[in-house]
Image (cartoon, helix red, strand yellow):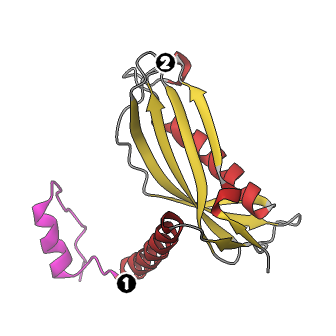
Amino acid sequence: MDFKSVKDSEVFISVLMQPSHSNFGGKIHGGYILSLMDQIAFACASKFSGAYCVTASVDTVDFRNPIEIGELVTMKASINYVGRSSMVVGIRVESENIQNGFVKHCNSSYFTMVAKDETGNTTTVPGLILNSEIDLRRFVKSIRRIEMKKAHREDYQALDVSTPESLEMLSQYNVQVNLPQDNE
């Protein structure tokens, strides 16, 4: 089996934020940032695997700080976890005011990418060499996120929303339930 280090996967991009990237509130549009993140996740996963990669899921997208027009956005991506054909790409987004040098952390996210062969079938990816405590921590945290995601999916599928307990739970929320009554 082939192995590569986390460093072999690293990709960095920097983009100057322009008025055309802004939303109606004058800040950089989150959708534009997500598009850039998807591009860097693709580049990172493809560089590591040597294959065409597709996005399988996007986890934990929290916009921590707004990005302003004129700021330089830098994205840093690396492989945090590998499975048989899947990889978790960790992405950190920072913006810098290029006039005063102030840098702020704007977003961190995890993209699950899947390697594909020429016919569109999944293909195996190299194993991951963990060379540092950070590499180890990121890999283990990825395992935990995968386990929690699986448990959440199983719990969600087993949920029966018609029980009295589920309906009672809704009394705490800003919702009115008007279900049609069964005719006997």
Instruction: Report the residue that reaches farthest toward the right.
Output: 118
Q: Which residues are magenta?
A: 159-184
Whether residue 170 is situated above or below residue 100 in the rendered picture: below
- For image coordinates 59% across by 29% down, the residue present is 15
SS for tag 2? loop
- For image coordinates 63% across by 37% down, the residue present is 13
Judging by the rendered image, the residue that carries numbered circle 1 is 158
Question: As rendered, which of 158 and 181 lies closer to the eye?
Answer: 158
- For image coordinates 88% across by 66% down, the residue present is 119
Question: As rendered, which of 34 and 92 lies closer to the eye?
Answer: 92
Find residue 85 and report its horizontal and vertical position in percent.
71, 73
Quadrant location of the N terminus?
bottom right
Instruction: Tell whether position 166 is magenta.
Output: yes
Work out whether residue 29 can be spotted.
no
Q: Give the residue type at disc 2.
A: Gly
- Secondary structure, magenta segment, majority class: loop
Judging by the rendered image, the residue that carries numbered circle 2 is 70
Whether residue 109 is situated above or below residue 147 in the rendered picture: above
